[in-house]
Amino acid sequence: MTQSFQWFALLTRSNFEQIVFDQVTRKKITAFLPKTRKISRRRDRKHIIEVPLFPGYLFVRSSSASAHQLSILKTLGAVRMLGSTHGPTPIPDTQILSLKIMTSAGTDLVTGSCISLKKGDPVMVLEGPMAGLKGEFFQHRGKGRVIIKIPLLGRYAGVEMDGDNVEKIPALLS
């Protein structure tokens, strides 16, 4: 009986994506860790680094046999395969192929909280001279730029900034 192999999403410990990927591939298991480039900001410099497109996840090709999946889950840093109470949920080959094409195109891919912001969402500035200020998301300006409204002296001031420097605040904390 031949086993069919399918793609599954594997949840990893925080910042363990590359370690898990390396160990799984050493076990001769096909894996895929899509990455994108990001500007890393340090106090004195900026440089471009590669980071996982989906932090905390990578994709593995596995059979539905428990022994094969257990081999993957015994990898240092692996947490669990995504799925339901019925077991891991396979990801269609076409979606993985699309991801491979997008990541190999050499263009910068964008994911994250900035995309899902809606007008009026409470946000906080993470970096820069206004770090720590709370405000309201106002609009997207394109190329990763956003405008947020910051309350000042009973009025609002609109500030345009890099979307990476803004994070949505959960409603309970705002």
Image: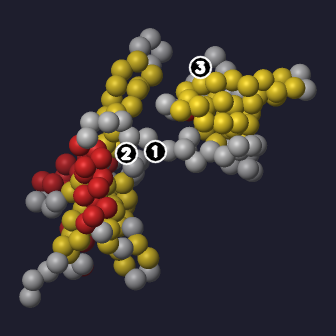
> Which residue sits at x=35%, y=74%?
88
Secondary structure under badge 3? Answer: loop
**For mark 1, what is the residue?**
111
Secondary structure under badge 2? Answer: loop
Figure quadrant of the C terminus: top right
Q: Is residue 43 above or below residue 106?
A: above
Q: Nearer the viewer, mark 1 or mark 3?
A: 1
Q: Is residue 85 above or below residue 152?
A: below
The answer to whether residue 45 is left or right of residue 160 is left
How much space separates mark 2 and mark 1, taking CA atoms?
A: 7 Å
**For mark 2, what is the residue?**
53
**Numbered tag placed on residue 147 in the rendering:** none
Residue lying furthest front: 142
> Which residue sits at x=45%, y=22%?
41
Q: Are marks 2 and 1 in contact (CB under 8 Å)?
A: yes
**For mark 3, what is the residue?**
128
Q: Is residue 20 visible?
A: no
